[in-house]
Image (cartoon, coloured by chain):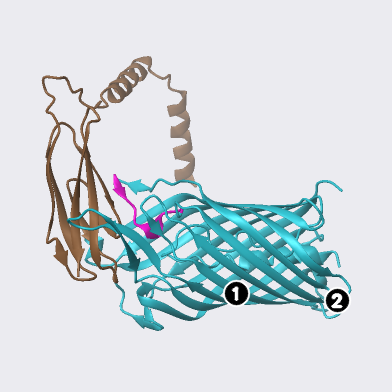
Amino acid sequence: MEYFSQNLRLLGTMSQKPINMKYLFVLFLVLLVTVSCKKDPEPTDDTQYVALKFDTLYASPDTFGIGGQTEIKAIASGTQLTYAWSVSLGDILGSGATVNFVASPCMYGTYQVTCTVSDSKSNQQQRICNITIQ
Amino acid sequence: MRIFPLVFLLFFPLLAGAQCFSSPGNPIGGTLNTGATKKGLLRMNTFNRYSFTRNYYEGSKKTENMLYEKAHYDYVGLLLAAGITSRLTFENEAGYFPFKTVYYNYPFSLYDDNKTGSGLSNWVTSFKYLIFAEDDKRFYLSASAGLKVPFSREFQSTNNVELPVDVQPSTGAYGGVFQLYVMKEYSFTGTRLFAVSRYEHNGENLKRYRFGDAFLQSLFYSRHLYLGNTPFPENWTVIMQVRFEWRDMNTVYLKTFPDNEWAKHTVTGTGGYAILVSPQLNYTIKSKWNLSLSGELPAYQYLNQKQLGRGWAILLNVSTDIQMWK
C-alpha cells in the first residue's frame, strides 16, 4: 500500500512538470523526416529506360505424368518488369519470373500457360508455353 | 396456420449445399423458395454457409490426398422474391464469398501455402409459376425458370498470378436454372412433405471452360415441435432433408499444338454424384421472422477419378416476409 501511494505521488509530480516545447518541436521534426523519407518509386527517365524484350518462355520439363509439376521460366529484359501468369487449367504456384505449374490429379492433354510481361511504360509482351501431361 | 408460408421458405437454404470446389459459383439453392409467393408479398432471405473438406475420393473410396490438403469457404446469400400475382413470383438472388480457400499439400506448399479468392458470385433472376394448387388437399405444384448471370467475367489474380478455377468466386459464365416444386401438407399433424427437382445448365466462360450440368433432387420432411411446457412450444420446427446430386464432367477447349486449333477436352477428374443428409432446426419469432440452423453431411459420394470430395457444412438463415401491396 505504501509502495502504491509513493508511486502515485511520483506520478503527480511528473504530471505537474511543464512540457518543454523544444522537445515537442524535435519530435515534430523527427516525424516529418520519417514521413517525407518514404521512398517513391524511382522515376524512369528515357536515359535509364531499357526497351522491353521478352526472349523466351519455357517449361522444364514440358512433358510429364498426371499429377506432376514443372517449373516455368520467363526470360525477359527491360525496366521494372512485372510478370502476370494465367493457365487454361491447373494451378500456378509462386510468382515473378519463375513459377511452378501443377496439374490436377486427373488432368491430361496439352495445356497452355500464358505469361505477360509489362514494363514501367506499360508496354506488354506475351508468350505462351505448351505443357503436355501424359 | 400463419406459420406455414414462412416455414416454407426455410426449406431453401437447405439446398444451398451443392457447392463444391470443382464448381465455383453460387452454392446451389439460392433461388429455391417453396411454392409461389402471395401477391404483393416481398420475401427476404439471407443465409451464411460455411463448408469444409479435406478428403480425396477415387470413386466412392477415400484415397490419399493429392494437390490440396484441405479447402473451405464461406458464402453469404441474399434472396428477394416478390409475388407479382397470386400465381407468379419474381425472384432475384445474389451471393458473395468472403473467402474461398485451398491449402496445398507438401511439397507444393513450399511455393504457396494457400490461395484465396473472394468476391461476388453469380446473380440469378427467375420467374416461378404456381401451376397447381388444391387448398382442400393442401397440395401444391410450382415450376420456375431463371437466368444465371456472372457478376464478373474476369478471372481473379493475386500477385499477378491467376487463381485456380476452384477458388474463383464466379463461374464467369451465363447459365440457366430450372426447378420443380411439389408440396403436400398435413395440417393436423403439423407435418409436410416437399420435393424439389433442380436442373442447372452452365455455359462457357471466357476461357472456354464449362462447368458440367447438374441435377439435384431433394426430399424434405418437416414437423412442428410440441415440447409441452417450453415457453414457445409452437415456434420450433424440425426439417430433415435428403438430397441426391449429380454433376456432369466439366469441359474445356484447348488449342492443339502445333496446329493451334481449338479442341474440346473433358476434364475427367470432375463430376460424380452424392447423397447428402441435412437436419435443420427452425425458430419462428412472432410469426414474422424465421431463424434456422442446419448442418450437412455426405452419406455417400462417388466421384469420377480422383477429386477433393464433399465435406461438412453448416448454415445459418434469417428470413422474413413484408406485405408491400394488396
Find residue A86 and report its horizontal and vertical position in percent.
28, 50
Find residue A118 and report its horizontal and vertical position in percent.
22, 36
The answer, for residue A126, to whether it is visible in the render is yes
Find residue B78 and report its horizontal and vertical position in percent.
62, 53
The answer, for residue B232, to whether it is visible in the render is no
Position of residue B10 in the picture relative to residue B253 (left or right): right
Q: Mark 1 sits on what residue?
A: B217
Residues tagged 1 and 2 counted as in contact (Cβ below 8 A): no
Three-letter amino acid code at disc 2? Answer: Lys
**Range drawn in magenta:** B160-170
Q: Residue furthest bottom?
A: B61
Residue B137: give its label.
Answer: 2
Task: Please identify the quarter of the rendering in which residue B204 is found.
Answer: bottom left
Position of residue A31 in the picture relative to residue B295 (left or right): left
Q: Who comes first in sequence, dot 1 or dot 2?
A: 2
Q: Report crowding for label 1: few under 14, some 14 to 19, many 20 or more residues within 10 A (C-alpha).
A: some
Three-letter amino acid code at disc 1? Answer: Gln
- Which chain's colour is cyan? B
- Quarter of the image where the N terminus of chain B is located: bottom right
In the figure, what tint was chain A given? brown
**Nearer to us in this view, B198 or B290:** B198
Position of residue B314 in the picture relative to residue A18 (left or right): right
Q: Secondary structure at mark 1?
A: strand
Letter of the chain that mark 1 sits on in the rendering: B
Find residue B104 and report its horizontal and vertical position in percent.
30, 64
Picture residue at 53% right of the left edge, 76% below the top: B297
Task: Please identify the quarter of the rendering in which residue B285 is found.
Answer: bottom right
**Nearer to us in this view, A25 or B209:** B209
In reply to whether residue B164 is colored magenta, the answer given is: yes
Q: Secondary structure at mark 2?
A: loop
